[in-house]
Amino acid sequence: MQTAEPAQRRSDAAAAGGSSALMSVRGLGIRFKTSHGIWQATRKIDFDIAPGERVGIVGESGCGKTITGLSIARLLPNNFAGLDGSILFDGVDLATCSVREMRAIRGRRIAMIFQEPMSALDPVFTVGHQIAETLRVHTGIAKEEARAKTLDMLRRVGIASPERRIDDYPHQLSGGMRQRVMIAAALICGPQLLIADEPTTALDVTVQAQILQLLRDLSATSNTALMLITHDLGVVAETCTRMITMYAGEVIEDAAVDDALVRPLHPYTSGLLRSLPHLSPRGGKLPSIPGRVPSILDMPNGCRFKARCPHAVAGCEAEQELCDAGGGRKVRCWRFRELELPGALQHLGSAPIAAMVSRP
Amino acid sequence: MIAQATGIPKDALDNTIVSVRDLEVQFQTTDRRATVKAVDGVSFDVRRGETFGIIGESGSGKTTIGRALVFLLKPSAGAILHDGIDPLALPRKGFQNHRRDYQIIFQDPNAALNPRMTILASVLEPLELARAGTRAERLARAREAMDRVGLPQETGERYPHQLSGGQKQRVVIARALTLRPKLIVCDEVVAALDMSIRGDVLNLFAELQRDLGLTYVFITHDLAVVSHISERVAVMYLGRFVELGPTDKVSERPLHPYTQALMSAEPRPLPSSMRDDHRIVLQGEIPSPIDPPSGCRFRTRCQYAQALCAARAPDWRELMPDHWVACHFADRPNFSPN
């Protein structure tokens, strides 16, 4: 693993266009202390995010996508036991920088929003106060100016009559409006990176569409890079340009969204796409991935997906590296060249939801 | 009234397992000053052996309908007939026996299973409450139900926390099957499951239906799930049905503007070249059911709304065979999202 690294790094730099990445994560891993000893939750996480790029991190519960987002923001739980690797953000290594340095970055240059806006907002302060607070802490501007900027931000996130809403308390707002307030608070300092962890999972589908459009538009107009953590491949397809798939604490595929959907290179990505009811013929048997994610206590050697993989052969017990697959794609499967894996387009003609859009 | 009680044709009776007429379910707010009409005048029939889907967003009343169908909630007005009889008219004992044929499964198996009971004890419990057969017969039936849903017998000795989410949902399904019901209301039964096992559980539902002739009322907010599993689907908004029809017709040619918006809002895992970027993004959110808009309830968010929509609630019309809609303008040409 150590020997492969320098070569890997060069190809990464080439793919990302030299030093143009806003953030470069290399070999990131996180360990926790538990009563059963030290648990390695994630490991060997490598990816780059370019300025203004919209990247989706997808995977099922427990794959490590949320903890990866929290690691970048250095919002780590108390039983945290250690961070491996580096998170180079605009020249600063977030994995090793001081708490004081991190505090100047978090909230100002890296912002984060979560699934449940009600638990992220303080119920005893008005939303205007909470948004302006971020701005005043980081820039020290006067109260009146902060209020004016807050009003402007509320307008930008699409809150109707912000003059009235700015003095509302969180409980007076609907779920969709609360998430808009969270986005306003996150973007008020003009961050370079917004980490959004399942920002629409608690919302209804029509409200979800509004929030995703807002995130897309704001990211484009302010050149804020978006790291969108979600289990929903549809949300990634609609919002992001690149998709990073995680499984059992590792990155297993990294590709442009369209490439990953049409021709996934990792059997797990392919399995996920095939199991979506959107894309399967109505009434037919839904393909599923047999078995379950290995336990963190008992991770297999080599490929972590091999016990559930229909393409597993002798050789999959070897340690798998994230290989460069060309065209800016990476995959953690040594057989990727020989496998022809089905993607999202397999049954399009007879699939119920997909059929609607393929109409002329 | 949206719901026109049409009277049940005689030949349809055999085919109908549940018929709902002008159903209303109301709740008092906690300060008792206002009434929430969670379900406000809904009529439909569920056909024997079919999967009847109900989709809607939070607050639309879909869960309330599901609970009312199995009499976990008492209708405030209207009627629910099970196989042509009104269970509420039965004597107490008769009602208890009757409702065993109509089961319900909820979203969260963690909340549905007692953490201090073994899996086998949980699956046995309905049989014990029903005093069905001898202990040996009850055990045999519980084991058979666990077999049916693909749970190995040794899981019976375990406790809920030792099982995965998918396995727990199988336990809940097994428990609902022990009393050999005719109909199961499934309320968001796969929403809490991960994508890769969701398919397994949906396949299991389909297989059980084929083998046991079950009828399902499948309540979900997930369009993809409902399109996959159900033959007919009803779209619910603010306590009323806005559209009801064969699933392929509703998803391919939705008649109601709300259904059109819902279909268009669904994020699709397709490459950009295949996605229709022309989507209808609805403004605002679902209004409060305490004080719903007059006339058509969707009019406050509808791009086609006119004066008539505020003045009069649209009739519930069968615009195409078996395809019903409540919209004044659904039959106008050019009335479509594209």
Image: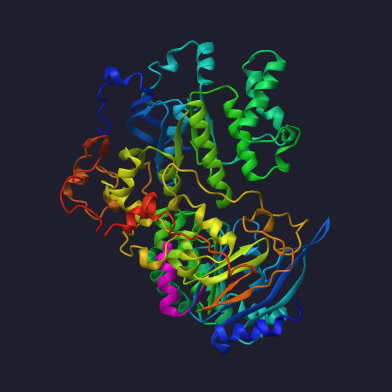
Classified by dominant secondary structure, the portion drawn in magenta counts as helix
Residue A220 sits inside the magenta stretch: yes
State the count of labels. 0
Above or below, comparing residue B96 to residue B147 in the picture: above
Above or below, comparing residue B280 to residue B81 in the picture: below
Identify which residue is drawn at 40% across, 66% down.
Answer: A213
Q: Residue A335: horizontal and vertical position, in percent?
A: 62, 67
Instruction: Depth check: give the residue in front, B139 or A345.
Output: A345
Determine whether, in the image, residue B259 is placed left or right of residue B177. Answer: left
Above or below, comparing residue A139 to residue B23 in the picture: below
Determine whether, in the image, residue A168 is placed left or right of residue A322. Answer: left
Q: In which quadrant will I find the N terminus of chain B?
A: top left
Identify which residue is drawn at 30% across, 53% down.
Answer: B301
Magenta residues, as a range? Answer: A211-228
Q: Residue B253: horizontal and vertical position, in percent?
A: 27, 48
Q: In which quadrant will I find the C terminus of chain B?
A: bottom left
Q: Residue furthest left?
A: B333
Residue A182 sits inside the magenta stretch: no
Q: Which quarter of the picture shows residue B115?
A: top right
Identify which residue is drawn at 62% across, 43% down.
Answer: B166
Q: Which quarter of the picture shows residue A268?
A: bottom right
